[in-house]
Image: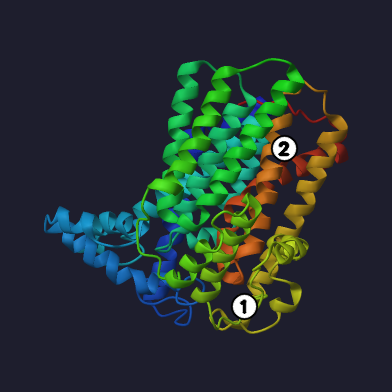
Amino acid sequence: MPQQNQTNHRLSPGTLLIIATVFHLLFTLSIFALARQGAFPATFDSNGIAISFAPDGILLQPEAARLGETLRRGQLRDWFSANSPFHIKLYSISFALLAPLLGPNILSAEPVNLICYLAILVIVFRLGAATFNRRVGLIAATTVALWPSLLLHTTQLLKDPQFVVGTLGFILVILLLLSRTIPWSRALLLAAAGGLTAILIWFVRDNMGHLTIAIAMLGLALLIVRQFRERRFHAANVLGLALIVLLSAGIVRFVPKFEADASSRPELDQTARANIKGKGPLTRVNTQIGIVRRRFIYQYPDAASNIDAHVSLATTAELIRYVPRAAVIGFLAPFPNMWVSDGSQVGSAGRRLSGLEMIGIYLVEVLALVGLLRWRRERAGPADQSEFSIWLLALVAALGMLALGLVVANIGALYRLRYAYMILLIILAAEGAMKIFDWLSGRPGSRVSQY
């Protein structure tokens, strides 16, 4: 333990954040410089915006530039009333400040992307430290910082970085309410933070709103189990999590969407909802899953990377039968046969690179399983502090992967939506890797949280 503490003090958290900041700035600048030189014309345009792996930015960059110009002219009412995606309005603020100097490119978008990148690393570290220890948190944060595709996506004009920040922040709030006995004042503050992160998720990806509610309800259920195990009632914790459940449900029910959903089919959605009046909760859940799945299929009608686009999940029986297949897709797609084929946008090189990254993801999943199994074998007993934190990370990751496998038929969209839940597995995998390292080196590992 003294040796570990000495290692931690060599680089302070502030120093590590400065290193991460410089690294991301240099990485973004390198991509922009290569794009300007036309080094990868099939991958990036002259503004550094991805043509192949994240083409959304090509369509949204002019809108962000236009809104940035609107802000510079002081037309705040027009900016607020514009029916534009939330993340594009964020980027337009950055464009308003930097585009006159740098142009409407990824360098002008870097302030938003850098804040998201650093926020992701900080939250990952705190999740790992709160669940296991600072060493696991540091390893997990470093792994996420160097994750190739996530790093690339944090240089683009995309909603994914904000979605990852919101989802991880939401999970951290639930974890703190679940695993700590806290006073009323802090419980209310955490409930407010949970509501704010739920709003961020809703504004960025409203189709993930119901999954956010499910995660909050899972946290509340685990808290109830914890209190039965300990035979103690923590009223502040229960109130905090109950408020988060209510706030998450209220946001989905009453807060309007931040933009018109171009991928929806209103006439089909209204018909589906009309058919479930008076039906049971399972039918309602099945209908909502079908609506979200249909939207993704409609948004990617001819994509070469679609999987099971013909599956509609129109009935509860179809949904139940499809669950095992959805789990396989959520955890393992893209499958090896897709690594060697040509993608319609990323080409053969992109597919091979994704294959290499999937090998790393398979390793992460194996190490996460090792971490869970070793923890089950070594846990101290019912009062172990980290037990419910570990269950929360594992169950939320499994729930997210399964939900995405059910509703997302396009592998490219699945890959990006999966980041937040894969990061939870990376935290568990960091603990598994440390268990293996400690076993090979003959040193007993420490599981005590140093948060």
- Where residue 252 appears, x then y in whole percent? 45, 48
Relative height, residue 203 to residue 261 (above, below) = above
Q: Quadrant of the C terminus?
A: top right
Identify the residue position indicated by label 2 in the image: 391
Relative height, residue 440 to residue 231 (above, below) = below
> Dot 2, crowdedness within 10 Å: few (<14), some or many (≥20)?
some
Q: Which corner quadrant of the image does residue 381 belong to?
A: top right
The kind of secondary structure element at disc 1 is: loop
Residue 41 lies left or right of residue 398; in this view the side is: left
- Where residue 188 appears, x then y in whole percent? 46, 24
Do the CB atoms of the residues marked 2 and 1 lie less than 8 Å apart?
no
> Dot 1, crowdedness within 10 Å: few (<14), some or many (≥20)?
many
Quick one: label 2 or label 1, which is nearer the N terminus? 1
- Where residue 405 appears, x then y in whole percent? 66, 63
- Where residue 361 appears, x then y in whole percent? 70, 59
Seen as rendered, the residue at the extreme front is 278
> Which amino acid is tagged 1?
Ser
Q: Nearer the viewer, residue 409 or 98?
A: 409
Residue positioned 35% across, 61% down in the render = 259
The kind of secondary structure element at disc 2 is: helix
Residue positioned 31% across, 60% down in the render = 108
Residue positioned 18% across, 63% down in the render = 69
Residue positioned 59% across, 61% down in the render = 287
Identify the residue position indicated by label 1 in the image: 305
Q: Is residue 18 visible?
A: no
Mark-to-mark CA distance, 2 and 1 = 33 Å
> Which amino acid is tagged 2?
Trp
